[in-house]
Image (spheres, coloured by chain):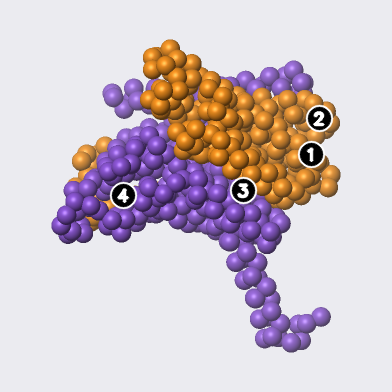
Amino acid sequence: MELVMHMLSTGLSTITDVLPIVGVIFGFQLLVLRQMIPNMKSVMIGFAYVLVGLTLFLVGLEEALFPVGKLMAQQLTDPVFILGTVHVIGETLNWNDYGWVYLFAAAIGFSTTIAEPALIAVAIKANQISAGAISVWGLRIAVAIGAAVGIALGTFRIVTGMPLHYFIIGGYIIVVLQTAFAPRMIIALAYDSGGVTTSTVTVPLVTALGLGLASTIPGRSALLDGFGLIAFACLFPIMSVIAYAQIGEWWTKRQSRKQMEDDPDARD
Amino acid sequence: MNQLRSLFGTLTSSIRDLLPIVLVVAFFQLVVIQQPFPDLARVLTGLLLVVLGLAFFVRGLEQGLFPIGESIAYAFARKGNLFWLLLFAFALGFATTIAEPALTAVAGEAARIAADGGHIADDDKSRAGYALGLRITVALSVGVAILTGVYRIVRGWPIQYLIIAGYIGVVIMTVFAPPEIIGIAYDSGAVTTSTVTVPLVTALGVGLAESIKGRNPMVDGFGLIAFASLTPMIFVMGYGMII
């Protein structure tokens, strides 16, 4: 019964979330473009699938993963747990005592990104347009690695208390340098992959981790230091996706060179 | 029969999508923290819902969201009226953001920080006003972002110069913005792009690039989301400076 109520309320909030979008689309279709969408019925069914899917997805996450994941984030960042694992005597903890926290941050960053529906959408689209040159899983894994590194580094920043903007500005400089050498077709997709990493699945768990850390470490304020993890999770996938494209390009070149060496007659 | 088989296929791939998360949570719960799951039946029911939900969503993506985005892009390209296209881009960005639940949560949090820092009076009314102002600011910024991004696709400008200019804007604003707002501003870029917006906007961009002569969908079609995650940072820091 409780579950049904939960579903109804989540479904309702999904619909209110989508309503303005539907309003804009239909408003422009009717008033400006003066045409109806082709295959109206099938598209409407598809839209209903999206609403139902999103509702079930959110309810399931809130029932199953978020409570456990949030509790886990609190327990892992609890000084009692950390003291228990590192066997130090004394009151101060060093940044290197938080090994499990970094590992958890990386693992949760990677796995939530793989499950992120918005990223699945972009990967499907990129695969279609690139005629298969960009594989759905290749892109998703590249983004997930970026998110993992980013969130782990973000927890390190909270533990050490270094200023957020140093990391972000440093990251920007690396992205700009990488852009100069990147294959042209990947650039826009790479910039996009930063924004799609963080939505339904990642944000709640990662925010819980950040707030948990910031509230248990002496000298950190949950409000000042707890934020910023999401920004890390957005920035690093840009780097990893560009790197993915560069490695792919290098690999293809190497393969074709190898082929030529193996088979001199194939040279034209 | 075919329908059933394809549904089964979608379900299996949803399970594969969720497997990493389940493994990570189980490993940390059982091996690192060494505690059993508090309510296993509930966790399993929830997981079942997540798998079903993801399968439905992916199905709806291909049948609903992608076709809508593309057909609108084609229709605007045929119509050839830039003004209406840009107005549509702005309206879409604004509308998808203003109702975004994640943004509402962040705005409430930001209002609390501003009240604690003494920037606004610490009562319900001024906090609600601050939060609403912030939401409108972010929605405006996403509207501007999608508008800029669509105009870029129409013109065929290389994306990197615009993004780098945006980065410089973020860095400059960081110097002048009050420190309390910086973390929130950086995070607000990420929360604006929701699960429904991303596929729709991506399909719009790619559809435009496909239907305008001389544009390559791969080089020009993507990038709308990138703008939508960049401009909120600048706008939110600006909001923090003004209020």
For the residue labelled by badge 3, is the local secondary structure a helix, a strand or a loop? Answer: helix
For the residue labelled by badge 1, is the local secondary structure a helix, a strand or a loop? Answer: helix
Q: Which residue is mark 3?
A: A191
Residue at (38% x, 17% y) in the render = B122
Residue at (80% x, 41% y) in the render = B155
User: Is residue A144 found left or right of A3 in the rendered image?
Assistant: right
Q: Which residue is mark 1?
A: B154
Residue B82 bears which disc, if any?
Answer: 2
User: How many numbered discs sit on the rendered protein?
Assistant: 4
Residue at (72% x, 19% y) in the render = A30
Q: Are marks 3 and 2 on the same chain?
A: no
Residue at the outermost left position: A89
Q: Chain of mark 1?
A: B
For the residue labelled by badge 2, is the local secondary structure a helix, a strand or a loop? Answer: helix
User: Is residue B89 found left or right of A171 in the rendered image?
Assistant: right
Mark 4–mark 3 CB contact (< 8 Å) = no
Q: Marks 1 and 2, how far apart in space?
A: 9 Å
Residue A212's x, y, as percent? 31, 41
Residue B47's x, y, as percent? 34, 41
In this rendering, the label closer to the viewer, 2 or 4: 2
On screen, residue B243 above or below B224: above
| Chain in purple in the render | A
Number of other residues with Cα within 10 Å of mark 2, as a class: few under 14, some 14 to 19, many 20 or more: some
